[in-house]
Image: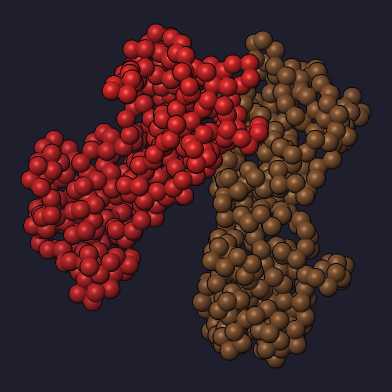
Chain colours: A brown, B red
Amino acid sequence: KDKGCELRRRAKFDDFVLDDDGRVVGVTIREEYRFDDKLYSDDLENTSGTKKTLKANKGVVLAAGGFCRDKAFRKLQDPRIPDDVDSTNHPGATAGALLKAFEIGAYPVQVDWIQFGPWASPDEKGFGTAPILTQQGTFKYGIAVDIRTGKRFMNELADRKTRADAEFKILREKPGAYPITFADTKMAFKDLSEEIIQKGMGSGKIVGECATLDDIAKKYGVPADALKETVKKYNEGVKAKKDEFGKQESALSEINEAGPFYVIRLSPKPHHTMGGLKINTKAEVISSKTNKPIPGLYAAGEITGGTHGASRLGTVAITDCIV
Amino acid sequence: KDKGCELRRRAKFDDFVLDDDGRVVGVTIREEYRFDDKLYSDDLENTSGTKKTLKANKGVVLAAGGFCRDKAFRKLQDPRIPDDVDSTNHPGATAGALLKAFEIGAYPVQVDWIQFGPWASPDEKGFGTAPILTQQGTFKYGIAVDIRTGKRFMNELADRKTRADAEFKILREKPGAYPITFADTKMAFKDLSEEIIQKGMGSGKIVGECATLDDIAKKYGVPADALKETVKKYNEGVKAKKDEFGKQESALSEINEAGPFYVIRLSPKPHHTMGGLKINTKAEVISSKTNKPIPGLYAAGEITGGTHGASRLGTVAITDCIV
């Protein structure tokens, strides 16, 4: 505001306005727009809001984010994503603005490179608290298990892509067979604040409490003998300082086989779309018609492509835009 | 011709002609167009040909192929591809038609899924003969070696993606350090016809002839002792019927360490672009504006996306089009 900027909420970008030379001179938007997360494709189905045209003083900066919540478009790019998985993003994370930029000639870059959070839960919406409970809890002090076999299937602390691919493999073979992660209650959340634990346990939906391994087996439909064997084998690896799946030695600690346990179901959630628009170092959007900037159009953030490679590292998505 | 069709050669698609309702009613082309494989981006730089507009009787079928020869666009999608690598495709395999379809609202599908031929040679243009000499020759009866270390680095008969990724890793670490594949001359080409062998050996550029392992080491800059150790180790694996890289037992045969040898350099070449336009079962191109067909527009072949998954299997790219 101090700089003469006005922030308009609930204003959704619909399309670009171009002049006769192909310069972006404005946008059409809808005011009082309400994203509806019950729609399969918000961009195609949502008719809310009132149309309006805005003139740009100097140019338009696209910062519409990624498309992790766009069930129609993300599935086109990665057919592994089940429709019943939401996303760690807000409901407005759709591909509409990206596709409109392609229509005026912007280069698509690596649009199907989608990063999934392998630490998320199918038992809560959005990002939620499971990512903290697993990543800093049960993944570190416990294990993840394929409920069909009772066996481990990944290094619980591998990179995001490796883990998400391993979880997707299970869900593709048997839809709905969400793997579980667990640790004994003494260890599971010992590094976490009381606030986070309360938030995670509060609903009673994300974290299951089981007295014994037999209880886990019963509750989640896991072969009990195989599950016990898996914990035993893991503990032997801890003692030998050599994990079967290459888990880091510093993160190896024995699981108390006697229990009790905290258990969380796992589902990889679309978290970040690495692909998008080609920009130059001035954040100008590059046209495939000329390999030069589209006059008047800039982009920043997740809607741009090619910055982060195939699997973005955590916390590095802070992009600057010079206009 | 019998069906009233006229084939026009050297006619390059430039853009679509739409009517007021957004129906594709024709195309603009250039006649007497000459693709120029010396250009970095033929689509952007080539000014040859004479412009012409063609009216479509019923509709337009896009069958412009993939973009393996489009150095600018393919690098946007996969930055690993060196500019000095050509492709197994003809010079007209550029992204121009695909990008024009995005401009009229076609959905992009998995555009960056590019398949590379891991059996190609940097010492000949295009597909060439090396793919046969390696795939049915030295890969089967010999090994592939990283010239920097003298060691093997892949199962020579793994799937295309696995092998291309392994070769790219080497070329990324040291540009120009093309790995080599070799077998002893008695075995190397024994399954191949005299015609193919003549074609491959004829130029003297693709197949190197070396009397001993020391000669290979000298000619290709490989550490000699490591190379000898590698062959010895491979032969031991053959005897034990257990290959270090999991090469199929049926393809294991000893290399005569005494030589002489045939040697071929390896470079993964862009071979097929799996991504492209979204079509339905009637081959109609789907619009991202409506999720319905773009009136008057059809597509077939490599320009379509989503059919073959992440790594096309050999020989299955024969697509039918019902118009």
- Say left or right for A151 vs A220: left
Give the vertical position of A276 relative to B177 (above or below): above
Looking at this view, is B213 or A33 the one in front? A33
Q: Position of residue A24 (x, y in %)?
A: 70, 19
Give the vertical position of B313 relative to A190 (above or below): above
- Residue at 56% of width from left, 85% of height from top? A226
Q: Residue furthest right?
A: A2
- Residue at 38% of width from left, 22% of height from top? B39
Give the vertical position of B243 relative to B31 (above or below): below
- Residue at 28% of width from left, 73% of height from top? B242
Q: Position of residue A96 (x, y in %)?
A: 69, 35
Locate residue A269: give its quadrant.
bottom right
Locate residue B260: give its quadrant.
bottom left
Looking at this view, is B256 or B252 the one in front? B252
- Say left or right for A61 vs B129: right
Q: Position of residue A234 (x, y in %)?
A: 57, 82
- Quadrant of the snapshot with the N terminus of chain B: top left
Locate residue A214: give its quadrant.
bottom right
Residue B308 in view: yes
Looking at this view, is A2 or A151 the one in front? A151
